[in-house]
Amino acid sequence: MVASLQAPLIPVDDVLPRMRERGYAVLAPDSVARLCGIDLAALDALVPSWDDLQPDRYLKDGGNYRKRRHSCFVVEDGNVVQVPHRAHWQSLDYNALHGGMQRWFEPITAEVVQQPAWTRLLHGLAEQFSRLRPERTWYVEAHQFRIDTSDGIGRPTPEGAHRDGVDFVAVFMVGRTGIKGGETRVFEADGPNGQRFTLTEAWSLLLLDDARVIHESTPIQPLADAGHRDTLVLTYRAGGFQGDD
């Protein structure tokens, strides 16, 4: 038996107050469905696409434990528009390990992007973030991740505790299979307080105010044979994508 710390789940009506108070919030799957107006079965229809992610060739630690896809969108006035495929870029200030270079990942497939649940998810979160910050246009980067234990250990955040250089971050747990570890840790960016817990339920969600908190996930190890941890990370930024300025 592998013990884990229970996620500090809150009711959906407390999301905005909690984000204003602490800079992060954790939601159960049913609260995510209510927040974004999505049926959980529609989200589950996206899950098989995680079996078709492509290797991340940019890992500087030489590992082979991460697969991913990446695409970018603009959300404005209820419309979600996918932009032409572009590189993912972060400054070294936010990612000392992989920042400062253009990383071209395979795009998220059309079968995923065309799902109504995908549009509702991106738009629903944009609505919440616009209530926290008066922005009408959000530049969204979407990352599908699979971290596996093919190397014996998998690192969800090889860069360590970090911020992403955006305004808000949404981290969805999509699935955990045959692993231990993968604990989520959230810390005040300018203070001593922090919290640690493990996201276990499919479509549970961690929301982050990127200016106020830093975050990381601990490495995973197999329970027996090889296992993996699947997540969807959506980052929301006002004013343009990282690298545009």
Image (cartoon, rainbow, N blue to C red):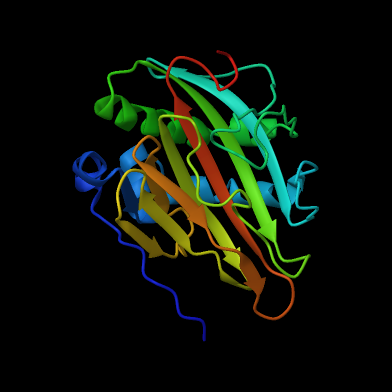
What is the total number of numbered labels drawn onto the structure image? 0
Whether residue 41 can be seen here: no
Residue closest to the eye, 207 or 41: 207
Residue lying at 54% horizontally and 54% vertically, measured from the top left: 174
Q: Up-down: is 169 above or below 79?
A: below
Residue placed at 37% from the left, 46% from the top? 33
Residue 16 point in image, percent of width and height: 23, 39
> What residue lies at 34% left-to-right and 52% top-to-bottom?
27
In percent of width and height, residue 167 lies at 40, 29
Q: Position of residue 82 (x, y in %)?
A: 59, 20
Tell me if 162 is positioned left or right of 108 in this view. left
Residue 205, can we see it? yes
Closest to the observer, 177 or 57: 57
Compared to 107, does 64 lie above or below?
A: below
Image vertical order of residue 113 relative to residue 74, above or below: below
In this picture, residue 58 sits left or right of residue 88: right
* Nearer-the-camera pick, 47 or 240: 240
Pick the quarter of the image with the C terminus.
top right
Seen as rendered, the residue at the extreme bottom is 1
Residue at x-position 63% and y-position 29%: 71
Nearest the viewer among 48 and 163 is: 163
